[in-house]
Image (spheres, helix red, strand yellow):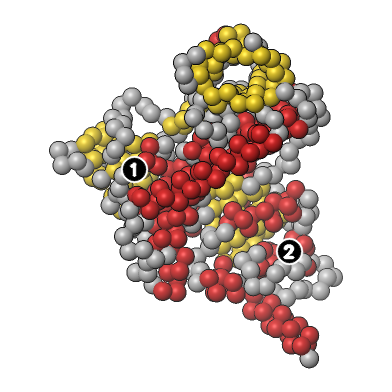
Amino acid sequence: MNHYDLIVVGSGPAGRRAAIQAAKLEKSVLVIEKGRRVGGVSVHTGTIPSKTLRETALNLTGWRERGFYGQSYRVKQHIDAADLHQRLLITLDHEVQVLEHQFARNRVQQLHGAARFVDPHTLEVTREDGELQRVSGTSILLAVGTKPYRPSHIPFDGEAIIDSDELLDIDTVPRSLVVIGAGVIGIEYASIFSALDTQVSVVEPRSTMLDFIDREIVEDFTYQLRDRNMKLIFGQTAEKIEREAGGKCRVELNNGRVLHSEMVLFAAGRVGAVGELNLEACGLEADSRGRLKVNPETFQTSVPHIYAAGDIVGFPSLASTSMEQGRIAARHAVGAPASEPPQYFPYGIYAVPEISTCGLTEEEVIARKIPYETGVAHFRETSRGHIMGLETGLLKMIFSRKTRRLLGVHIIGEGATELVHIGQAVLNLKGTVDYFVENTFNYPTLAEAYKIAGLDAWNRMDQGPREAPVATAQSLDSALQAMKKAASS
């Protein structure tokens, strides 16, 4: 039986980052992956596929150009499932090849098969050929990720009534779709298929959605979805789902309303993939959703040498944060110093339109009784927005009136998940509104919205004897043009 300094179960974002970090510290590392190829949920059914599907839909439909050429503009008139799969397969192959190369370059050993605990330090792996192999580790990191929640009363058939993993294997693009669940996964897929001109209805038992996002952003998002005829049905649950004789799906809600569609996507949560791990043998117990409780600073479980990271530990369940969790866990597991990650991290929702946020929401600021001011910039106020034909999109920042520090940045619209990193840096460096007012941004760019939003807040804050800066996007344009003219002369 081979022994390793660190055994990592799962090769998703948390697992691969942990394995490579430990290997760079010259430790012996083994990655056990149940799937036939490395990458985990993130590469094969989650993050990468859903974002690839989104980009494919936006490109083939000509979505980004409709501000100039009208709603009837299409790059490809008839888009089928094969069009969506083609780009997906190319992307996934590239991701797997990169990861395989990283493992080989850092001498990370791999073992394909399903792992289960025999005792706290020993795992038994059922390999693809059916053979059993036992391995032991000084430390073990569980990074097995999650799988879709599939309640027994939903008649999943893999064709018309499906979960989010099965969605990637559909044979046709449905003309109508009912999405059960308005969480991040449900709303991402709902908005993507809406961009593909599918008639989409979303059913959510709560009266709101995306409660961790700033309400002003959610309200703008909701308006945009309804403006393109998406049906958002809040406060209702799907009591019964069935296939009708003609092949269509019938969804009966608890208020008696009946929805008909070609396809139903059930996306109401995910559960930790811990069922085969035999956690009892190592002294661990998962909660009702298959999640493990860990020390948030070290990611140790209640068994000190066993760590857990990634989606299996719960919120925020992001690929980006999972990578950092895996890195920190690996360093602690092999006895290397590990610093805590910065306080603020960005959260991205790859819907159509994108949403990204970092820091406190306005609701959180109010709850903490912090005197504050907000600044808002609409993308249509920027020259770059005009060039791109953007009619929607906004950036919102929240500042403390007392310290002038940035407290939160919230963006909806094209490039939101890229733009947010400017605000993230200022947040973690404890920057103030003056940074945005006094700094220079490339022109024309959407990042100029930071300047406009900063000025919007600055104009309503106490300034003291300071001279007021330029106050509008138009005057910014004038100032820049005057500078160019002076430079040319």
Q: Residue at x 36, y 56 (%)?
A: 196
Q: Give me the C-alpha separation between circle 1 and circle 2.
A: 46 Å
Q: Position of residue 347 (x, y in %)?
A: 60, 46
For the point 60% across and 36% down, the residue is 100
Identify the element where label 1 is drawn. Answer: loop
Where is residue 349? Give x, y as percent.
53, 48
Q: Which mark is residue 170?
A: 1
> Along the horizontal axis of the image, is 70 left or right of 199?
right
Which residue is at the far bottom? 489
Q: Residues within 10 Å of mark 2 (few under 14, many from 20)?
A: many
The quarter of the displayed image where residue 105 is located: top right
Instruction: Give coordinates of residue 432: x percent, y percent.
Output: 77, 57
10 Å crowding of disc 1: few (<14), some (14-19), many (20+): some
Is residue 288 depicted above or below 106 in this figure? above
For this orientation, the residue located farthest to the left is 245
| Left or right, residue 442 beside residue 196 | right
> Mark 2 is on which residue type?
Phe
Say if residue 14 shows up in the picture.
Answer: yes
- Which numbered disc covers residue 82? none
| Nearer to the camera, 64 or 436 | 64
Residue at the spot 78% in from the left edge and 28% down from the top edge: 26
Number of marks present in the image shown:
2
What residue is rendered at 28% in x and 39% in y?
Answer: 160
The image quadrant where one finds the N terminus is top right
Foreground residue among 460 and 42: 42
Q: Amino acid at mark 1?
A: Ile
* Rendered-image quadrant of the C terminus: bottom right
What secondary structure is found at the residue carrying circle 2? helix
Residue 455 spot, x, y in % from top left:
69, 68
Whether residue 328 is visible here, answered yes or no, is no
Q: Which residue is mark 2?
A: 436
